[in-house]
Amino acid sequence: MTKTILLIEDEPGICMAVKDELEFEGFHVRVETDGLAGLASVLQNPPSLVLLDLMLPGKNGFEICREIRRRGIATPVIVLTARSQEADKIRGLELGADDYITKPFSLGEVVARIRAVLRRCQPEHANDVVQRGAITVDFRKHQVFKGNKLVELTEKEFLILALLMKRSSEVVTRDDFLKTIWGEEVYVTHRTIDIHISALRRKIEDNPEHPMLILSVRNVGYKFNAS
Ligand code: CA
């Protein structure tokens, strides 16, 4: 299957050279030159791999990388950095990038790194689909199924469920939810989380009054019942 590489980079020269080289090597290539458009492209249709410049108009590479991971999208990311500072590389990796390439780079190096990261992220995106009991989350397609029935969730409900399932059987505190899902939106209170959990239960529980999937842990938070 042809792998799709999404290049998010605002320097036309680099875009053209990398695109040509990757297409020559048999990849399908999408290019975005703005951070916001780049992020939207990842979210709407996750590629096989993202080549991500750090300094971008709209939204910088760090923010994009964090947002991709926050939404549970497992697509590998290689950061392209013009800076040689070690701190940037480390920060990129901490935010969930899989590798980095320092500019200026050779096209051969880009191809080699892409192939290495794709190989490392085999077998076929093991984390893209998580199943616990009757519930299946497809992180690539951003879909949730109960049995084989598609469940329509809001974005926040999806993120809450994804976090609970990833930490299956561990308690997720209300502060964990706030930090991971709402981030800087400080006006959100614990009560907001409880409201979202109730809505989520109405959509996925057989009997929302007696939840069997999302369990309350008194005074602490919630946990997903994987058994
Ligand atoms: Ca740039």
Image: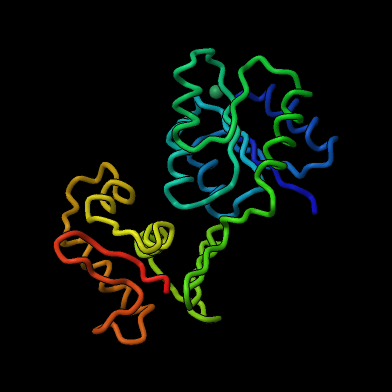
**How many numbered marks does the figure carry?**
0
Q: Position of residue 117 (x, y in %)?
A: 67, 37
Q: Is the residue 125 above or below the residue 202 in the image?
A: above
- Relative to 91, is 109 on the left or the right? right
- Relative to 138, is 13 on the left or the right? right
Residue drawn at x 19%, y 45% as measured from the top left: 186
Residue drawn at x 22%, y 56% as measured from the top left: 174
**Quadrant location, the N terminus:** bottom right
Residue drawn at x 31%, y 86% as measured from the top left: 207
**Quadrant location, the C terminus:** bottom left
Location of residue 209 (image quadrant): bottom left
Q: Is the residue 28 above or below the residue 83 in the image?
A: below
Q: Is the residue 17 above or below the residue 39 in the image?
A: above
Q: Position of residue 107 (x, y in %)?
A: 76, 23
Residue drawn at x 35%, y 65% as measured from the top left: 157
Q: Is the residue 115 above or below the residue 42 in the image?
A: above
Location of residue 200 (image quadrant): bottom left
Quarter of the rendered image showing ligand 1: top right
Picture colour scheme: rainbow
Q: Position of residue 161 (x, y in %)?
A: 38, 64
- Relative to 93, is 10 on the left or the right? right
Q: Position of residue 44 (x, y in %)?
A: 55, 55
